[in-house]
Amino acid sequence: MTNDQRRSAYLEEIGIGPLWKRRFPPSETTGVSEPVVEQLPGIPTHQEAFLAEPAVPGTSMAPAAETHAFSKYDPAVIARMDWATLKETVSGCTKCDLCQSRTHTAFGVGDEKAKWLFVGEGPGRNEDLRGEPFVGQAGKLLDNMLLALGLKRGENAYIANIVKCRPTDAAGKDRPPTAEESAACIPYLQRQISLIQPAIIVALGKTAALSLLNLRPDTPVSKLRGTVHTYADRPLVVTYHPAYLLRNLADKKKAWEDLCLAMATYGR
């Protein structure tokens, strides 16, 4: 399937039809000025972890002796882990209360040397059962979005979440992770990004965008769209979460605009 055919499949899925034409040059797409958004005081940025060099594959960077029970969860330790150690640490993580009700952690899936990284909120029921991000209807829609970009799950694309365990409310229904839960889990995502070295990051939804950009919780996604942000010296584009798009079909066209912005940015 050619890139144009993949894009046509996604356009048909979101109801835009065959009239779409790519706009060039990319600078016309990215000419929107970045909004001024107030940053929460006292919250440090998350970019220092990327200063660590990727570990040699197959080499465990766990400390020889732990000074206390949770030293393996220290960000400085996580920032030196290789893939195998990182996966093992996540699978047994008890750093926050989300571990108490999970079935499986959803570590991440895809090409570990991908140029495209997609970051969502956290696993839902299906993801908790299978231990993989973005399965079910939201996952199918994300797969169509990948096809529109000329990508495929596992081929030049990696999919991860802000938190690795399913957040639920008292009734057992899915909910967004709290700020504390996100802060506890984000060192794992930081290390994933450091190991993958993506060329571009796409934040899927409000939780992912606010966590990565370190913004106030009342910042709407609408203020973050249309602008190329930066995270750890990498371009970051914000769009809607696939689960949101399933509930708000009219915004699928806006999501396509975001993907066009991402494509233009990646092309540069």
Image (tube, rainbow, N blue to C red):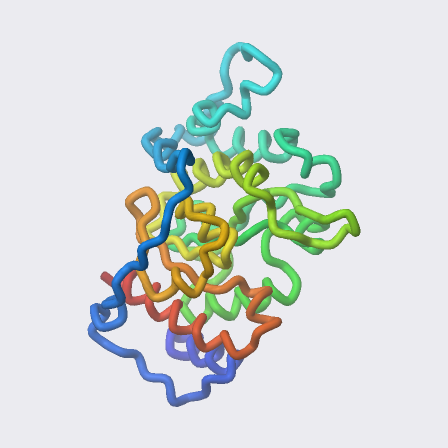
Question: Is residue 159 visible to us here?
Answer: no
State the count of labels: 0
Viewer-proximal residue among 58 and 238: 238
Left or right of 64 on screen, residue 22: left
Pick the front one: 140 or 206: 206
Is 87 left, or right, of 21 in this rendering? right
Q: Is residue 41 left or right of residue 176?
A: left
- Relative to 254, residue 223 above or below: above
Tell me what residue is drawn at x 62 percent, y 29 percent: 95
Q: Position of residue 129 (x, y in %)?
A: 72, 50
Whether residue 71 is visible, yes or no, is: yes
- Residue 193, quarter of picture: top left
Instruction: Give the quadrant of the C terminus.
Output: bottom left
- Within the image, what quadrant is residue 222 found in? bottom left
Residue lying at 38% horizontally and 37% vertically, measured from the top left: 45
Please report the residue visible at 54 percent of the width from the left and 46 percent of the height from the top.
Answer: 108
Give the residue drawn at x 39%, y 68%: 259
Residue 57 drawn above or below residue 244: above
Q: Position of residue 114 (x, y in %)?
A: 40, 51
Which residue is the extreme one toward the right?
A: 171
Determine whether, in the image, residue 198 is placed left or right of residue 170.
left
Q: Which part of the image, by quadrant, shows the N terminus?
A: bottom left
On screen, 216 above or below 187? below
Residue 166 point in image, percent of width and height: 66, 46
Q: Nearer the viewer, residue 91 or 122?
A: 122
Residue 181 x %, y %:
59, 39
Judge by depth and name the residue closer to the eye, 45 or 128.
Answer: 45
